[in-house]
Image (cartoon, rainbow, N blue to C red):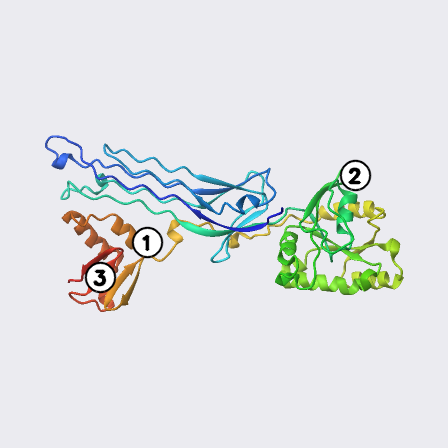
Amino acid sequence: MFVDYTKIIIKSGDGGNGAISFRREKYIASGGPDGGDGGKGGDIYFAVDPDANTLIDFRYNKKFKAENGENGSGSHCTGKSGNDLYIKVPIGTIIKDAETGKVIADLSEKGQVELVLPGGKGGKGNSHFATATRQAPHFSQGGEKGTQKEIILELKLLADVGLIGFPNVGKSTILSQVTKATPKIADYHFTTLEPNLGVVKTDYGDSFVLADIPGIIEGASSGVGLGLQFLRHIERTRLLLHVIDISGSENRNPVDDFYKVQEELKKYSAKLATRKQIIVANKSDIAQDEKLYSNLEKVAKKENMEIYRVTAATGNGLKELMIHVAEVLKTLPKEEIISDKERVVYTLKEEKAPYDIKKENGEYIVTGPAVERLMNNVNIEDNESLAYFSRMLDKLGINQKLKEMGAKEGDTIRLADWEFEWYE
């Protein structure tokens, strides 16, 4: 089974909490703070697997989580960092954010490894919060939470040349004739249900990868038939061989077929529609009406495209065509399908605004990652920790924002799971 599109959920590891600990030493308040830092949460990487060619491994395994960092301990001992998670995918896999559709990474090179989701930072131990006036802090910093994302894995074949055209026009036969590939061939529509690849080697020592892409029909750009599966794989190719049946079988008109495929390419991607094409007029041995070929020849001239007349079943004309294709490829640069501007690498800092305040039923509710981190660091039972908490509310601008929103003495303020009364 060929699987080229799937959604999975990934979560980077949580950072470990900083420790609250005191060493026992004479003449030092409470023995002196010696709480160690928490370990960093594991990162999530995606790596190219040279042995994989489908995304079938992700069909049932949908959730992936990196290891959490361990908590810190006494004697300034830092917790162990969580192990990073490496997820292997086939070459040609594009990773997208399922929510925004933005590209996170494009794994199109051998040995490529990309950091997709960094783990949370470890929290600081109470030894970091000791000052001249606060010599025995009874609070530490909680670890930063990892990030969870739903992502799309989309596999696009890495072929130099793509065979395109309507079903049953001879694309699979051409592939079998010029490469060692053995695609399924039969005289009915959609014999090819998944892309097939083969390596073409010419008599002059040139070689390139040729892909037989499933046949297109009207509405493919909207997902009709094999639709987007077909168009997705064409994007990677540098040159398209547009195979057209000129025999007039099934009452098809070669010129109409040519323009219908062009229209689907244009609807899917304006860039794809301008990719260089060579028209391959196939089944010439059984052509009954020469006007069908001559009309297509006029279209090729009008569209400034080359046209080759072949008979795939016997191999007639294919050798010359492949030699020409190899020469054309030398003039076509390998372009990046995904631009640098489209790539996004997520970091924890890019997740959300630091905090948000809204008023509901007379209460002020403060939420956001900055608030969650702050509350994770506070020991409500410790006066020094509460003083630190109050200073941080000022530093983050939360107190000022509450005043601007009309908070008055005695109003209820909710932060995370805690409830306070506002006072000035």
Q: Amino acid at mark 3?
A: Ile
On the image, the x and y values in percent for residue 222 come to 62, 63
N-term-proximal mark, 2 vs 3: 2
Identify residue for label 3.
Answer: 413
Q: Amino acid at mark 1?
A: Pro
Is 85 situated above or below 368? above
As drawn, is 10 to the left or to the right of 258? left
* Crowding near the residue tagged with mark 2, few <14, some 14–19, many ≥20 C-alpha atoms within 10 Å: few
Whole-number angstrom distance, CA of label 3 to CA of label 1: 17 Å
N-term-proximal mark, 1 vs 2: 2
Identify residue for label 1.
Answer: 369
Residue furthest out toward the left: 27
Which of the two marks, 1 or 2, is nearer to us in this view? 1
Whole-number angstrom distance, CA of label 1 to CA of label 2: 62 Å
Which of the two marks, 2 or 3, is nearer to us in this view? 3
On the image, the x and y values in percent for residue 134 come to 15, 43
- Labels 2 and 3 touching (C-beta < 8 A): no
Identify residue for label 2.
Answer: 204
N-term-proximal mark, 3 vs 1: 1
State the SS at label 3: strand
Mark number for residue 353? none
- Labels 1 and 2 touching (C-beta < 8 A): no
Identify the residue shown where x is 69% and y is 53%: 214
Whole-number angstrom distance, CA of label 2 to CA of label 3: 78 Å
On the image, the x and y values in percent for residue 336 come to 59, 50
Identify the residue shown where x is 25% and y is 51%: 375
Identify the residue shown where x is 73% and y is 47%: 184
- Labels 3 and 1 touching (C-beta < 8 A): no
